[in-house]
Amino acid sequence: MVKLNEGFSGEGNARLALAPLQLADVSARQRRQRLRAALDTLPMPSPRWRELMGQQGALVEAWLEGGEELRSPSVQGTIHPGAAGRPGAVEVLSSHEQVLGGAGGQTYLGCRFPAADPYRAALMRHGARVGEALAQEGALERYAVDFIARRFGERWELQAIEINLRQGGTTHPYMALNAITSGRLEPGNGLYRSPTGTPLFYRATDNLCSPQLRGLLPIDLIDIVAEAGLHYDPAQLRGSVFHLLGCLSEYGKLGMTCIGRSAAEAEAVYEATEARLVQAAAERAGGLTGPLR
């Protein structure tokens, strides 16, 4: 995996397959020639990828393969200020399954909360240990750790691949959930519960896009969702909330967090909201319906 030094959301990543290049039994000169030629055919996420690589530089990481199933979970935490020069206390905030896509399958599109049950507790333990190490170095506030999860039979293997010392794509959905429900995360199992004890789940995206949504105002969007009964209802603890509405009218793009009392319900709310937005946008434009990207 070749990663731009200043890339984000996976936009600076490109996968380089080494096996077809047969580099083991060739000279150093031939090895360089084959690598340069391979770089010209990488599935680059951006037309300016090569130019940016020359400007920013890049690093290379091993690409993990194998296993019967591959996932991309992450864990988020914060480091509170310490006292008298001591490292701050670490708090694990959330865990997620990242939804990736794009040309090389490396672009962040959205997430599901929380991470899968078989490895959620281990994920949070690893995240806490990373946070403690960062605190020793003087880091403060938000951080996140991305993992690769590979399944071998009944066993899941976790490999940490990246640390982000910042807020990320999973930050806003979790903050939205926390703000509108006033619940709390249970550190022992990683589930988020409402004040009444109901476990809550969500699916979120930053990349709900369609040309049909261009020209739609935020107030139009809210009306469409409310008329369909898909807006967040605090009594039922389910529904959709939106962000990135400043992109909606000009670019036909928005973000949303779809909350439910189970993972299946959150997924159903997401699919129903997406379908209704497509339908309503097409009706307003007098065009044909089609899926959002």
Image (cartoon, grey):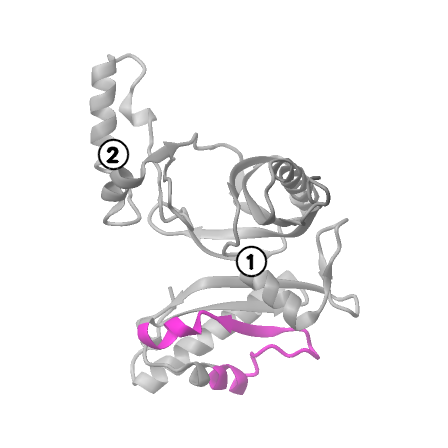
Left/right placement of residue 169 relative to residue 141 reads left
Give the residue drawn at x 70%, y 44%. 121
- Is residue 247 shown in magenta? yes
Type of amino acid under label 1: Thr
Residue that appears at 54% across and 84% down: 226
Magenta segment range?
A: 222-250
Q: Name the one closer to the observer, 115 or 185.
A: 185
Location of the N terminus by quadrant is top left
Depth check, front residue: 247 or 102: 247
Q: Please name the residue that numbered disc 1 is placed on.
A: 171
Q: Is residue 188 above or below residue 282?
A: above
Q: Earlier in the sequence, mark 1 or mark 2?
A: 2
Residue 278 position by quadrant = bottom left
- Residue 87 shows up from this direction: yes
Q: In what element is the residue under mark 2?
A: helix
The answer to whether mark 1 and mark 2 are in CB contact below 8 A is no
Residue ID for mark 2: 39
Q: Which callout, 1 or 2, points to the residue nearer the camera?
A: 1
Q: Position of residue 64 (x, y in %)?
A: 47, 32
